[in-house]
Image: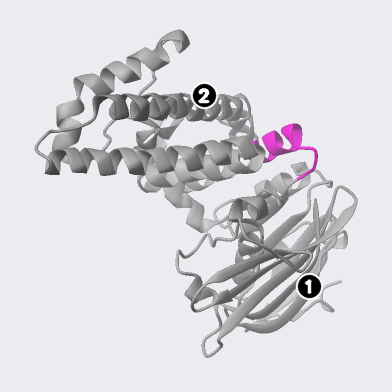
Amino acid sequence: MILKKLELKNYRNYKNACLNFNSGLNILIGNNAQGKTNILESIYVLSLSKSFLTNNDKNLIKIGADSAKIKGIFDIQNTTKQFSVLLNHLDKKVYINDKEVKKISDYVLNIKIISFGPSDLKIIKDSPSGRRKFLNIALSQLDCKYFNTLSKFNSILRNRNEYLKKIKKDNGKYDIAYIEVLNNKYVDLCIEIFIKRKTFVDNINNIIFKKYGEITGDYNLSLKYDSIFNNVEGTEYKQFLLNKLSDNFDKEIYYGNSIYGVHRDDFSFYLNDINLGLYGSQGQQRVAILALKLAELDIFTKYLNDTPILLLDDLFSELDILKKNNILKKISPDIQTIITTTDLNKIDDDLISKSNIYVINDGEVDDKNGK
């Protein structure tokens, strides 16, 4: 999968911009706050219809403009396709080959992308919801069935929570048959999501220790997955959770909320049995995220029929030059990689000679320099 051409109109600090990328390494160079990250963000939005920096699409529109447009021309398995995202202050529309796609799920599953930047530190530092979000995005790109299962689960979860609130409002009165049907669907979806997440984490653990070790020399990084189904035999998943729901039904009615389920799942990073989220340095945390994303890259490459696009945004700032260049050299030349930097001198000359280079200055792109 290759992004051949990117066009921006009234996006962030760009009035108009056009970049033609090569299939290997592409380098965006410029001082801080010039718009390098905005380009990576626009590619992410073009791929997943959401930003990794903001939840408000209005923030993506250039100040003073009524709308913004991102357009990309991709080579996907030797077929050229055009994807577009049009944003205004009221809504968002997505297009494939100039034809509007009504269902976001039919759009986002086409482009496979892995991004890696300072904001990803929240995967370690912030709440479990951020870690679940990482799993959901990765698995949705790997498996469209997961995306649909997750959508069904979120719908059932909303219905169940609403019904719990209704029971409380009605002084404990409820339809036994309805709650049994609801619980069975809820549990089945929980099990399906858990199995896919657990399998993905297991696959990550088969790789992440090596990725971390290649950077630091310490080969003891792992993920520990925390779920309601921990220490439960697979054949007992359903009855276990059904019993849990039954035993705590009064408590759930009191809170008007589903207390047990995969919407409470979490995972942690451990280095030599030390929880990096609690006790790791910022440098260790950044490298752990890097190892996670490189492991994810290997999994995508193995299980997809095409390679993903890799975005790297200034995440090597705490690594020495040797480690940084070793990492770049280990990334397959078949993986289109787009990185940002403030200093070309930190990048190996041989890598530079094989790269497209774009100088970013206050929302302007110049691809005639540095080659």
Magenta run includes residue 201: no
**Location of mark 1 (residue):** 19
Residue appearing at x 73%, y 49% in the figure = 328
Percent of width and height locating residue 87: 58, 74
Q: Residues within 10 Å of mark 2 (few under 14, many from 20)?
A: some
Percent of width and height locating residue 188: 45, 24
* Bounds of the magenta segment: 295-307
Percent of width and height locating residue 42: 63, 67
**Is 209 situated left or right of 54 in this image?**
right
Residue 320 in view, yes or no: no
- Indicate the secondary structure of the residue bearing disc 2: helix
**Location of mark 2 (residue):** 195
Percent of width and height locating residue 305: 80, 38
Which one is in front, 285 or 158? 158
Residue 277 in view, yes or no: yes
Q: Residues within 10 Å of mark 1 (few under 14, many from 20)?
A: some
Q: Amino acid at mark 2?
A: Ile
Residue appearing at x 35%, y 46% in the figure = 127
Applied colour scheme: one colour
**Is 58 situated left or right of 129 in this image?**
right
